[in-house]
Amino acid sequence: MAAIVSIRNLSKRFGSAQVLTGVSLDVEEGEVVCVIGPSGAGKSTLIRCINLLEDFDKSGEIFVDGIEVRKGRQLAAVRAEVGMVFQSFNLFPHLTVQDNIALAPERVRGLSVEEARARARRLLDRVGLAAHADKYPGQLSGGQQQRVAIARALAMEPRVLLFDEPTSALDPEMVGEVLEVMKGLAGSGVTMIVVTHEMGFARQVADRVIFMDGGQVVETGTPQQVFDAPREQRTRSFLNAIIRH
């Protein structure tokens, strides 16, 4: 099966700091890939490069559904196929929940107002928030806002969904409701690349787990292999530290 996301020799510097070094990765359509590792490993930078929220060194290449990710006219086509869910929701506070979700399908996909709002209502029902369509983001809990953000990403019917530590800004009691929505998505065949500190989620939902450290992919494998029988000492020490805490 051809990769829907293909990354080759990806490197990225912030000033004198080398954040990514020669990362290569293929993600197949329908695959759920969880990226784990310590803070500063380059995980968020990696997925932000996929839709060029971060530029990367010219030696690297990224293709999404066969389209090269580079500045220029084709970038809009890439971004239309790649949905992103951030740590901090990034909802428009002056728009209702429904209008937050409907905006991009109207502006980018060309849906009518009625079509876009109908899609928004269907997606709000999917994430368990149908009763909150006319509320504003500030009237919702953090967990509810993140579920709206997931619905907003789905509204563009993307080929790939990127999640940048989607539960890290939430109070602990709100994490579960967001993870449940993500588990449902994973079971529906959506291609997902998830940067996460939620090891239980990665173990349960991922088709493949990637452990990163120091801007490089240290180890990749099935959840069972990575969590139960890691090959690399750095992976073992990271997981041991996580388990102890």
Image: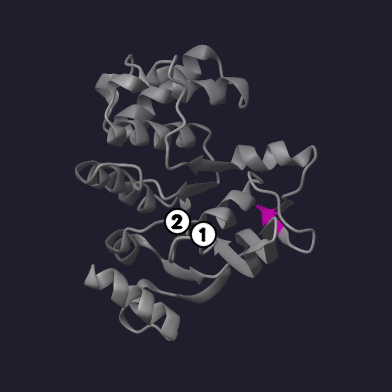
Q: Quadrant of the C terminus?
A: bottom left
| Residue at 55% over, 25% down | 105
Q: Confirm or deny contact between disc 2 and disc 1 (CB under 8 A).
A: yes
* Residues shaded magenta: 62-66
Quadrant of the rendered image containing residue 139: top left
Residue 102 in the image: above or below residue 171: above
Q: Under tag 2, what secondary structure?
A: strand
| Camera sees residue 110 | no
> Would you name the residue on which mark 1 appears?
43
Q: Position of residue 55 (x, y in %)?
A: 70, 49
Q: 12 or 224, which is in the foreground?
A: 12
Q: Amino acid at mark 1?
A: Lys
Q: Residue furthest left?
A: 173
| Residue at 65% over, 52% down | 64
Q: 125 or 99, which is in the foreground?
A: 99
| Residue at 53% over, 57% down | 29
> Would you name the residue on which mark 2 appears?
195
Q: Is residue 243 left or right of residue 43?
A: left
Q: Position of residue 203 (x, y in %)?
A: 31, 66
| Camera sees residue 151 | yes
